[in-house]
Image (cartoon, coloured by chain):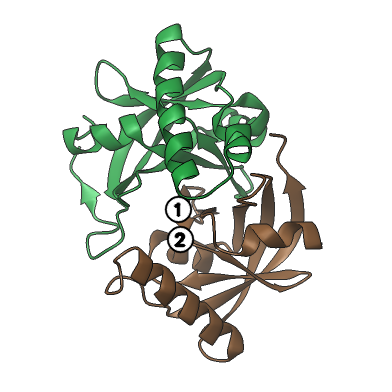
Amino acid sequence: MIEEQHLPAMQGMFPSTFSTCSKNGEPNTTVISQVWYVDEEHVALSFQFFSKTRKNIAENPFGYVTITNPMTMDMYGLDIEFVRSETDGDLFDDMDMKLQAIASMSGMEDVFELKAADIYKVHKVSELPL
Amino acid sequence: MIPDITFEVIKKGFGHLGTASNDKMPAHTDTLGAVVNDRKDSITFFVRKTLSEKVLSNLQDNGKATVFIGVVSHEAYQFKGQFIEARNLTSEELEMSEKNRTNFIEVMSEMGLPKPAIERLFGVEPDTGITIKVNEVFVQTPGPEAGKRIDT
């Protein structure tokens, strides 16, 4: 599912876009700093705010996220489904450290706080036809 | 009415237009410029049709749309509304998009990203305008105000 060619798009150098949908069919779209590779069938997204995204995922676990290779601009769309949240462990610590670095670089140390690493199953990866 | 404070971000920012299918599967496409229409109650977003097939299909099915638009300073807004139409872009709109895209390519290049790569996405002009009647506007700038609804 997730192959080596997709990994450069998951290093947090180019923001990703994440869309969700409420139980009533209302879409919501936001920008996230990074999609994390977990294994060939899973990615992790940072849960930082109690947002519309988080509410939607609680109601309807399906999402769509696009990732971009910053060196080539190759873009991929991932159909994903929420599996679980992790609030400790290596993945959480890695994500927390990276998020703090991004927050520091953008002067938003007081705003960014990792509440959980949300794990999603990847159902499909599609390359967008640029 | 779309709030005046959002106009600069609409004009200068790039966005992501989100939709959902009738079976509640979301999809989005990148916007390459936008214009607030004369009555200030709708926005036409400029997109590339080849990158927007699923989005256009969803809009035809149920019309529900949401658009995140932000600028480099992190100021961002979310517009929620109803699909009105998809149409060809005017020469004026194409000119607006080109100005924005050229500026964005320069900003991205200065950040160290390879210009030929950036031009693969932002160097190609959009060919479709998606017009959304805006019903709700929310602050999306990271911080304590994020998610706050702005009166329209």
Q: Which colour is chain A painted?
A: brown
Q: Callout 2: 10 Å neighbours few (<14), some, many (20+)?
A: many
Mark number displayed over residue A53: 2
Q: Name the subunit of mark 1.
A: A
Residue A34 placement: quadrant: bottom right
Q: What residue type is labelled 1?
A: Thr
- Disc tally is 2
Q: Which amino acid does label 2 sit on?
A: Thr
Residue B43 placement: quadrant: top left
Tell me which chain appears green: B
**Mark 1 or mark 2, which is nearer to you?**
1
Report whether B99 appears left or right of B150: right
| Quadrant of the snapshot with the N terminus of chain B | top left
Report whether B89 appears left or right of A64: left
Q: Give the percent coordinates (x, y) of residue B98.
A: 46, 21
x 64%, y 44%: residue: A73
Are the residues tagged 1 and 2 within 8 Å (C-beta)?
yes
- Residue bearing the label numbered 1: A30
